[in-house]
DNA sequence: CGCTTGATTGATGCCATTCAACATGGGTGG
DNA sequence: CCACCCATGTTGAATGGCATCAATCAAGCG
């Protein structure tokens, strides 16, 4: 078994020409002090098993904008997110982008048990991953059914969330999309002492999640602000002033 | 362990007022002559295990339009599709529908290892299912890792397909949506001797898959016909005349 | 300070929806 | 077998929501 992390070195700033920017290696750490030890897919493993798994992989540091996996590439890597936020995205032939998922600390990324990576994985913030060669991970998973079960649980949850998002993409208006997005972020992200959420996404990225243009997102945000539903703080800060009214605008089932 | 198939009796004609129409019980069959024995999730089980699994479940016949599981209901049933086509759908608060998946023979439906059924499951054609109480199925799966592995594989594939569909919903034009849909159906469905595909879906259902209105679907189909790309045969028959041109219209990556 | 990048706002146009009328075809009963 | 009916599908015209194009504004940075 060779350890091939070359693909990470294709990482590039989003949209910029490819630069040889290797993901920084952080050295091998044990799992004992890992922040996500109890929430990631390794949570159900005992100490010994977890050590065995950690020997397969290694920690890697990513900068915001770096891409770890490319849509359509052969699937050679999978990973657990230790820290940070990343996007999963697909592209049409002429370059239109759709973000198909956003992952946070303790989430799992990559395509185990499959030949191709179906979507790109790009860091939105600086991030740390616990990166495994797919083949080795697949073997480990097949022989540790507690891990595989947890992976199944996670995948089933992802599928549910993804399908719920299809209702938004296919049937909701721009207003409803933005309202749903804001409440979704409010649920996942921490609020600072002034009640402000710091979005890990630019307007363009929000547009790519919601299937809208940047201008429409901006207009909807301004409208919500004008109606006293939210307040905007700098480029990425949002404070929700009237969660009930926002909830009413989501057209939730 | 009680065997509770009551939910099936809530099955109703699509959109019609609820009628007490029990799913027809077909009696217990062995797996030996099952059409999908080698393709469904039970494919990797040996004869003995498969018999054990089949004792947990039973065959059920559905009529087109009957709904087996309701969005939001507690998850008490899962099933393998033996024959026929079914839709998975979610609804917004005000009744807008989005079809989040279409399943065929040998596919798996329902939500194992979870409390809620996240979407409704409705027969589009007459169909036969191999239906299991979820709790019993979950137990069986947990103790048969080959089955669980296959379920994982299937779920990962579903997730890939679903995410690919998000690109269509969020970023494609009506023309591109319809072209993509037609090629997708051509791949999955059999062609009769005149080269005609019989769609298992009404125009409304196609619209609910693509996030469009019935009129837009109809117009796009008529346009494609006018341009000599397809021919229409009756309400649900389609013949693809120029697959290349259709492919060009999909904006595929 | 000027330059660059990201966000907002405005003006205009187009594509999909909406509302409405009409066509088709499959099924039923005389 | 045909007339009739109802559900489904098609076509037309008008509207509107979102995209597009473009200008302006705000922040960060050398």
Image (cartoon, coloured by chain):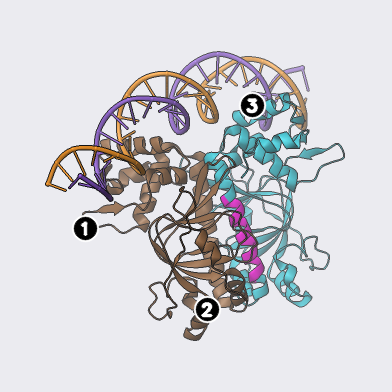
Chain colours: A cyan, B brown, C purple, D orange
What chain letter is assigned to the residue under label 3? A
- Alpha-carbon span between mark 2 and mark 3: 55 Å
Q: CA distance from mark 1 to mark 2?
A: 38 Å
Q: Chain of mark 2?
A: B
Task: Find the magenta span and give its range.
Answer: A148-163
The answer to which image quadrant residue B159 occupies is bottom right
**Residue plotted at (58% across, 78% down):** B144
Q: Earlier in the sequence, mark 1 or mark 2?
A: 2
Q: Which residue occupies the foreground of this view, A60 or A40?
A: A40
Give the residue pinned by disc 1. Answer: B193
Tell me, yes or no, whether the two marked residues, 3 and 1, touch with CB atoms within 8 Å: no
The residue mark sitting in front, 1 or 2, is 2
Spatial CA distance of label 3 from label 1 is 54 Å
**Residue A198: horizontal and vertical position, in percent?**
77, 39
Q: Is residue A118 magenta?
A: no
- Which residue is located at x 72 percent, y 23 percent? A226
Camera-near label (3 vs 1) is: 1
Vertical relation: D29 (above or below) B37: above
Mark 3 = which residue?
A219
Q: Residues within 10 Å of mark 1 (few under 14, many from 20)?
A: few
Of helix, strand and loop, which one carries label 1? loop
**Residue under the image location 57 percent in, 39 percent down:** B94
* Position in image of residue A44 (x %, y %): 73, 71
Which mark's residue is nearer the viewer, 2 or 3? 2
The residue labelled by disc 2 is B53
């Amino acid at each position: 078994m060779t350890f091939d992390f070359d693909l990470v070195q294709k990482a590039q700033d989003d949209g910029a020409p490819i630069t040889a920017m290797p993901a920084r290696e952080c050295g091998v750490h044990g799992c004992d002090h890992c922040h996500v030890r109890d929430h990631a897919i390794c949570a159900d493993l005992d100490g010994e098993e977890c050590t065995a798994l950690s020997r397969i992989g290694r920690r890697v540091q990513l900068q915001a904008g770096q891409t770890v996996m490319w849509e359509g590439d052969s699937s050679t890597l999978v990973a657990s997110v230790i820290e940070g936020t990343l996007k999963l995205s697909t592209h049409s032939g002429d370059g239109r982008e759709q973000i198909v998922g956003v992952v946070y600390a303790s989430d799992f990324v990559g395509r185990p048990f499959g030949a191709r990576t179906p979507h790109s994985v790009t860091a939105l913030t600086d991030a740390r991953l616990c990166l495994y060669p797919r083949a080795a991970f697949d073997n480990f998973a097949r022989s540790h059914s507690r891990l595989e079960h947890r992976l199944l649980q996670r995948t089933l949850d992802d599928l549910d969330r993804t399908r719920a998002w299809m209702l938004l993409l296919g049937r909701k208006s721009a207003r409803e999309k933005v309202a749903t997005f804001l409440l979704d972020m409010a649920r996942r992200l921490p609020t600072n002492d002034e009640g402000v959420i710091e979005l890990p996404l630019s307007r363009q990225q929000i547009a790519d999640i919601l299937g809208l243009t940047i201008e429409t997102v901006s207009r909807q945000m301004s409208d919500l602000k004008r109606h006293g539903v939210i307040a905007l703080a700098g480029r990425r800060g949002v404070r929700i002033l009237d969660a009930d009214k926002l909830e009413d605008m989501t057209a939730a089932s």
